[in-house]
Image (cartoon, rainbow, N blue to C red):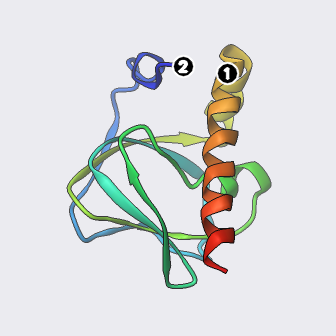
Amino acid sequence: MNLEDLMMYQTDLLAVDSGKTLFKEGETGDSMYVLMSGTANVVVHGKVVESAKAGAILGELAIIDNSPRSATVVATSDCNLIAIDAHRFAELVKEVPNFALYVMRGMAARLRNVGSLL
């Protein structure tokens, strides 16, 4: 799946400067994010579990299960992201079923990384 093609009509980019926090563990979340450029660390309980780069999906758990954020995400370079709320996520899954698979693969990889740190 080519994520760039899927997101090409999304024009509202969120800019996050290097060193800034996108969201914090425990916060309420109403959007997930697609990292379009830059890099960011995904931190769980103070440990970096992923160094995300362009194409990464961030914050998906909060909109899938309506629970508080399970991680903190900090930009390690200047980043551009696309925010996707729960309604848009449902539309994308309906329109492009492979998008759901893409998200699930990212979640699975992150869970494996967290498991290896325990």
Q: Position of residue 98 (x, y in %)?
A: 67, 21
Q: Residues within 10 Å of mark 2 (few under 14, many from 20)?
A: few
Residue closest to the eye, 31 or 78: 78
Q: Quarter-wise, where is residue 20 in the image?
A: bottom left
Q: Residues within 10 Å of mark 1 (few under 14, many from 20)?
A: few
Kind of element beneath mark 1: helix
Q: Which residue is mark 1?
A: 98
Look at label 2 and name its amino acid. Met
Please tell me which residue is depicted at 66% across the width and 17% down the height of the picture.
Answer: 96
Whichever of callouts 2 and 1 sits on the residue coming sooner in the sequence is 2
Please tell me which residue is depicted at 41% across the width and 53% down the height of the picture.
Answer: 52
- Tell me: residue 33, above or below residue 87: below
**Camera sees residue 69:** no
Cα distance between the residues tagged 2 and 1 = 7 Å
Look at label 1 and name its amino acid. Asn
Residue found at the very far right of the displayed protein: 65
Q: Position of residue 70 (x, y in %)?
A: 64, 70
Please tell me which residue is depicted at 35% across the width and 41% down the height of the picture.
Answer: 54
Kind of element beneath mark 2: loop
Contact between marks 2 and 1 (CB within 8 A): the answer is yes
Relative to 64, is 70 on the left or the right? left
Q: Quarter-wise, where is residue 40 in the image?
A: bottom left
Relative to 47, is 113 on the left or the right? right
Q: Position of residue 53 (x, y in %)?
A: 36, 47
Q: Position of residue 66 (x, y in %)?
A: 76, 58
- Tell me: residue 8, above or below residue 81: above
Q: Which residue is mark 2?
A: 1
- Numbered mark located on residue 56 in the image: none
Please tell me which residue is depicted at 47% across the width and 19% down the height of the picture.
Answer: 2
Q: How many marks?
A: 2
- Tell me: residue 90, above or below residue 62: above
Relative to 70, is 48 on the left or the right? left
